[in-house]
Amino acid sequence: MREKLPDFPWDALAPYSEIARQHPDGAIDLSQGTPVDATPQLIQTALKESSDSPRYPVTAGTKELQNAIRNWALNHLGASGDFDVLPVIGSKELVAWLPTLLQSQKVIYPEIAYPTYLVGALLAQSEPIAVGIDAADWPSADFAWVNTPSNPTGRVHSESELRATISWARQNSATLVCDECYIDFGDSVAPTSLLKYTDGDNSNILVVHSLSKRSSMAGYRGAFLIGDPKLISEIREIRKHAGMMVPLPIQNAMVAALSDETHVVEQRNRYNARRAALSPSLAAAGFKIEESAAGLYIWCTRSEDCWKSVEWLANLGIVATPGSFYGDRGASHIRIAMTATDAQINEAAQRIKEAI
């Protein structure tokens, strides 16, 4: 199995990180989507208050967590009809293992995408099929990933595009899973959930949400599934057998996170302000900013090999991610993360200006 998996992409970035570290004022790492802002205090408090936790947690999640996810789905996502919920140990493990859990044979995923969609298909020994946005052009398959807002591009699917994916799923009797982990971070476009457009029929439909970015909880590993009760029941039973359960203190921290939107608005404003601070310098340096309507990233290009752009920034002490990590269509792009402090973002902007 290991020989079928691609090399871990970020290992290839190590030489450029080393170049950046040689900068006299130090490296600014904008290659990783890992939060740097403090976890909100109410979440830290909930974790601390749950630290005495001698019993095993339940895979389905506590009633309090289930209710918190349900209410959030109704009030925040516009969910309707019959649906169930399931907490998971961060969204990445779910993305990597869901095709295996569902015994999928053909897995559709976006042609510019988070690498774990492909890895999940390979782990399941499924046929991976990279596709464009328009579901009318998709081939038949039994499983499909949609990602909105997109990592890496920040593109947001329209209502018509999301409804087209639902139509495709109905026509093919396929499982449709929408990764919506960046839904709270709209900038020029406000993202909406796939669940808003199911018209109350959630059969064969799931959405994935994570608190890692929304609530600066990446170290907690808290995420959840919402959707088709039959599918979630099947997934839950397998995960019970495998001992795949979210620790109880994390479950209680997730309840606290979902109870508050103020910290989410504050975090969204931080990321959008950082994008606004860095974008003009990149544009002045010849980078064309594309998509980048939501999420944590700037997706841009100078119409050159992405590694050449990565090297140019590395010589300024800035580490960016080559677009080739996300598929062949990204070979001339780079992804720049807003997961750095305000001071670091401003310093990166200044270095780029001075290099022009």
Image (cartoon, rainbow, N blue to C red):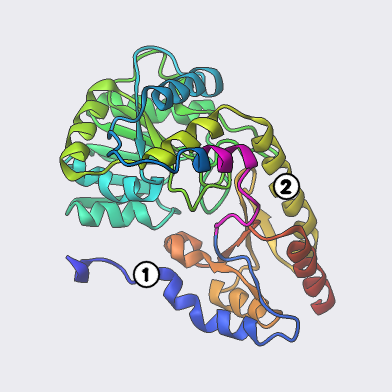
Q: Residue at x 56, y 81 (%)?
A: 16
Question: Which residue is under mark 1?
Answer: 8
Is residue 42 covered in magenta? yes
Q: Residue at x 74, y 62 (%)?
A: 345
Task: Report the front residue among 92 and 144.
Answer: 92
Q: Which mark is residue 327?
A: none
Q: Residue at x 34, y 13 (%)?
A: 82
Type of the residue with mark 1: Phe
Q: Is residue 157 above or below residue 278?
A: above
Q: Is residue 149 above or below residue 261?
A: below
Q: Left or right: where does residue 88 sit relative to residue 277?
A: left
Residue 169 seen from this side = yes
The part of the chain drawn in magenta is 33-46
Type of the residue with mark 2: Arg
Q: Is residue 59 above or below residue 19?
A: above
Task: Report the front residue among 192 and 348.
Answer: 348
State which quadrant residue 251 falls in: top left
Task: Measuring from the top left, give residue 329's x and y in whole percent.
Answer: 46, 60
Residue 223 seen from this side = no
Question: Which residue is under mark 2?
Answer: 270
Q: Residue at x 61, y 80 (%)?
A: 311
